[in-house]
Image (cartoon, rainbow, N blue to C red):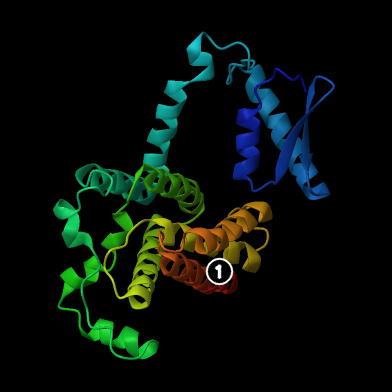
Amino acid sequence: MDAGLDLRPLLGAMARSGIRFRVNEESGSQVIWVSSELEVARTAQLLEEWQKLQAQGAFVQQSAASGRGLAGYFPVGNYVGDLLRATLTAPVTIVLIVAALIVAAVSQLGADLRPVDFMFYPALNPGAVAGLSTLLSILGDMQGMSDFLRTLTPALLHFGAIHLVFNTLWLWHFGRMIESTQSSVLYLFVVLFIAFVSNTTQYMWSLSSNFGGLSGVVYGLLGYIWMWQTVIPFSRLRLPPAMIGFMLVALVLMEVFASSWIATAAHAGGLVSGMVAGIVIALIHRFRK
């Protein structure tokens, strides 16, 4: 196909159908590569449907160079449209990001924690011995729902712009993937479970309430998707192995070079809890099918 042809509607339909693909430019043409004969047949069917819709004027083709001034390079309307669609298809992810941004604004990116000190992990009795008894001591020391909520809210605290941007971008990526393929209610419960485990793991490890960030949840969602695609290999919910490897290497490097600046235990607790949730829910889904 011509190199100037806008293939986004076709590629979007392929992605929604769970077809794995890549697009290369070869000798002035765009070539779509898929991984199996079955996907070739499905792609051919989608291509035929797309060409019919194109002939009916359903799509207005634009080449990459035909943008009008800055709007061609920065299509603000498209970004706004994507945000509005995400509000409908990924409401939990949008609410989490907005909440984190509001908390960051109120706390001046962690420079003034007095307005948000009620969001820190509660000072609970961890007991004398680390392990299951420690967790039981923490749970037994909770004084009602307010203490339980404070085991979740540290995820919304961030310390610096880089910390906030890194976490919200990855949450935007992983969260929309999950909510677009699974129930937002299920996703919410997974996020709450990961937040509780990651924050509690960090508190048990450090015995300090001075930590925060969505990175534990982010690594939990990574683990969730990783295990889901392991149990259900042909699911639409999947990540490239290279991305999974990159995130795991980054986790190790952060521990080696910046362990005193990051909540490593929260990252590890989030990853493990997300993997557990991914295995359990994927097995339930598989057996029900």
Q: Which quadrant holds residue 169?
A: top left
Q: Is residue 271 left or right of residue 6?
A: left
In this view, the residue in front, 283 or 54, is 283
Q: Is residue 7 left or right of residue 263?
A: right
Q: Position of residue 197 (x, y in %)?
A: 38, 72
Point 16% across, 69% down: residue: 146
Q: Secondary structure at mark 1?
A: helix
Q: Position of residue 272 (x, y in %)?
A: 50, 71
In this view, the residue in front, 217 or 4, is 217
Q: Is residue 182 left or right of residue 214?
A: right
Above or below 116: residue 8: above
The quarter in which the N terminus is drawn is top right
Amino acid type at image mark 1: Ala
Point 85% across, 21% down: residue: 27
The quarter in which the C terminus is drawn is bottom right
Q: Which quadrant holds residue 63?
A: top right
Above or below 8: residue 95: below
Above or below 100: residue 55: above
Q: Is residue 134 left or right of residue 227?
A: left
Instruction: Please name the residue that numbered disc 1 is placed on.
Output: 282
Point 79% across, 42% down: residue: 40
Dot 1 alpha-carbon crowd within 10 angstroms: few under 14, some 14 to 19, many 20 or more: many
